[in-house]
Image (cartoon, helix red, strand yellow):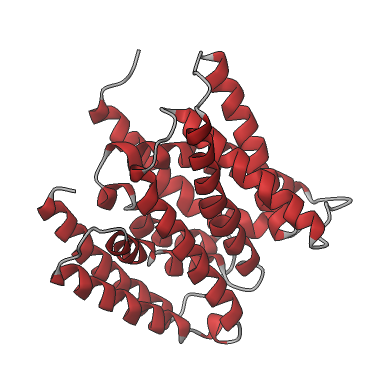
Amino acid sequence: MQLPARFVVPLCLAATWLIWGSTYLGIRFALESFPPFILSGTRYLLAGAVLLAIVKLAGAPWPSRRQLGNTALLGFMMLTIGNGLVCVAEQTVPSGAAALIVAATPLLTVLANQALGSRARGIEWAGLGLGVAGIVLINLDASLAGDPRGFALVIAACLSWAIASALMPRLDLPEGPMSAALQMLAGGLVALPAALLSGERFPAAPTPAAIGALLYLAAFGSIVAYSAFVWLLRNVRPALATSSCYVNPVVALFLGWSLGNEAVGWPLLAGIAVILAGVALIGWAAARRGV
């Protein structure tokens, strides 16, 4: 029996807000033993295989060839590139700072939708301007000043994720969790061979903390939260579906500060305030347009 949407929406939002906010610190712990693309590929192969087994046991039909190609494209853009580059960046960028930069994703999604034919209003462009200003402030923080490459990698990850988010409602995809399962399998099937070809190797003796972090990322960050995100993108307004980007930095900053001993400087705090003001403008504009 399916739950009514009024119950599913808050549950999915809670998953993307709270669980995804914690995954930035989880990635940092997992990177203590696992190289970045080994981590990303293993995480999504495990999660995708488990979720696919669950949905097939529940009787879900196989997708068409076209649907399979579309899910593979989204998995590559969102998970191989999007999550993979964040993992690479978090080798030098604090988890809270990475989450702050990712908060600009809804702003980049406006640009992606603009390119795909959805015209943005003046208030949305004002939000974009604030988002750019916030990113500049974040880049002034001492924790980022020494690693512009890490900053650039997170921005590239956000751009790939934003384009895929704009494409997802426009593509023919399988119904229900089958779409999330195949996206995760596609992301992992590309990331893991690429990691091995680039010289990454599985650790001989990973730490218990790294193994626990990997399992947490696969089970909660992927099977639960990513499935919730895919459902939201297909069933609610894009502004609401991407609202996790507003909440995740707060969760990530708190966890990074309390559990990861990460410093929080004034440029980070100022940057998040300006970025959140920008995304609030875009969310308000989207609510007025009813999309």
Tell me if residue 184 can be seen: yes
Q: Residue furthest left?
A: 288
Closer to the camera, 185 or 43? 185
Closer to the camera, 148 or 258? 148
Which residue shows up at 29% across the image and 67% down it? 276
Residue 10, horizontal then vertical, whole percent: 30, 37
Closer to the camera, 224 or 227? 227
Give the answer, above or below, for where 171 lies relative to 121.
above
Q: How many marks?
A: 0
Closer to the camera, 279 or 176? 176
**Residue 269 as seen in the image, left or right of residue 92:** left
Residue 28, horizontal then vertical, whole percent: 63, 60
The quadrant of the image that shows the N terminus is: top left
**Residue 203 as seen in the image, left or right of residue 175:** right
Residue 137, horizontal then vertical, whole percent: 39, 83
Residue 223, horizontal then vertical, whole percent: 54, 36
**Residue 71 as seen in the image, left or right of residue 1:** right
Which residue shows up at 83% across the image and 51% down it? 202
Tell me if residue 218 can be seen: no
Which residue shows up at 40% across the image and 78% down it? 135
Q: Residue furthest right?
A: 204
**Residue 166 as seen in the image, left or right of residue 102:** left
Which residue shows up at 20% across the image and 62% down it? 119
